[in-house]
Image (tube, rainbow, N blue to C red):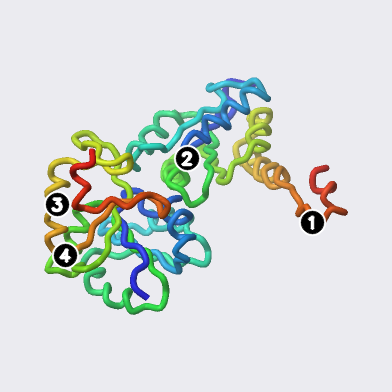
Amino acid sequence: MSEDAVRGLIIAHSSLAAGFAAAVRQIAGVGDDVIQAISNEGLGPEELLEKIRVAVGDSPVVIFTDLPSGSCAFAARKIGADRPGTGMICGVNLPILLDFAFHRELPLQSLVDRLLDKGRVGISGACIEDGARADRAFSG
Amino acid sequence: MPIVLFRVDERLIHGQVVVGWGERLHMDRIVVIDDDLSASAWEQELYCLGVPAAVDAVFTSVAAARRDLPTWRDDPRRVIVLVRDLKTLAELAEEGVLAGEDVNLGGIHFAVGRERVLPYLFLNAEERETLQRIAETGVKLSARDLPGSRPVAYEDLLGSS
């Protein structure tokens, strides 16, 4: 993987970001140099912004957040508003992060488009009362 | 319909407000009172990205809010009003405009000079004085980060660190 590959930053509530990062590390074998985690816990808006600014540095980055309506997403949008080379994905899930870990050499726009598709496909399910079709929902 | 939540929260529109309170209170509208934000269209756009499609978001100045408060109280829509700091709340509360209003202290976080009052409420000496002034105007203050949390009345607040 090129050193110019896009880096990832997960910003989420409580310990969610650290949990996601740990799961990606366990499955994909990548560390903080690829995907870094930030929690908003106990941070005011300015402190969170500063923490994100330090973490994103100057290279291309995709910022993943949990809620589209949260303070994490707001801070990420504020950073991205005047920072070229910033992708953003709200409602992050593990399939998105794993795909990111293996495709981060793609151009940023292509990468973000791809990750949005992967994230949507990564959600499936069925109501248990609809037993005849429930198995299909888990087959991908 | 009265204002369903009047809250001081430096994060303004964020998860606790939109999901934690908004879902519980079935909000129809968010009003953010902030002089800087009311003059910044791009920042308003950023905040609006986090607002559910069915919810109306309005950004207004302190002066306009003092004029429009009676309208919001009479509006059939369920309104959550947000200010980011105690200074703004104090300006709003001048001359008893907010007398009798329940105001929720929901999130003022650590910064240099502030001391912990509650896990989600940090105040410096000036803010404590401002809070006292606000209380003297008749505002009913209490602290509570989420609907499921225990509310802490103003009278108990400054001794709870």
> Which residue, given by chain and number where applicable, does mark 3 sit on?
B130
Amino acid type at circle 2 is His
C-alpha distance separating marks 1 and 3: 57 Å
Query: Where residue B17 sits in the image (x, y, percent)?
Result: 41, 55
Camera-near label (3 vs 4) is: 4
Q: Chain of mark 2?
A: A
Please give left or right for residue B56 compared with residue A16 in the image. left
Q: Which quarter of the rendering shows the C terminus of chain A?
A: top right
Q: Secondary structure at mark 3?
A: helix
Mark 4 and mark 1 in contact? Answer it, CB < 8 Å. no
Between discs 3 and 4, the one toward the N terminus: 3
Q: Residue at x 62, y 28 (%)?
A: A23
Say if residue B84 shows up in the picture: no
Check chain identity for marks 3 and 4: say if they share one: yes
Alpha-carbon distance for marks 2 and 1?
33 Å
A72 to the left or right of A115: left
The residue shown at (23%, 74%) is B67
Q: Kindly identify which residue carries mark 1.
A: A129
Q: Chain of mark 1?
A: A
Q: Position of residue B123 (x, y in %)?
A: 21, 42
List the residue tagged with mark 2: A13
Residue B138: give its label.
Answer: 4
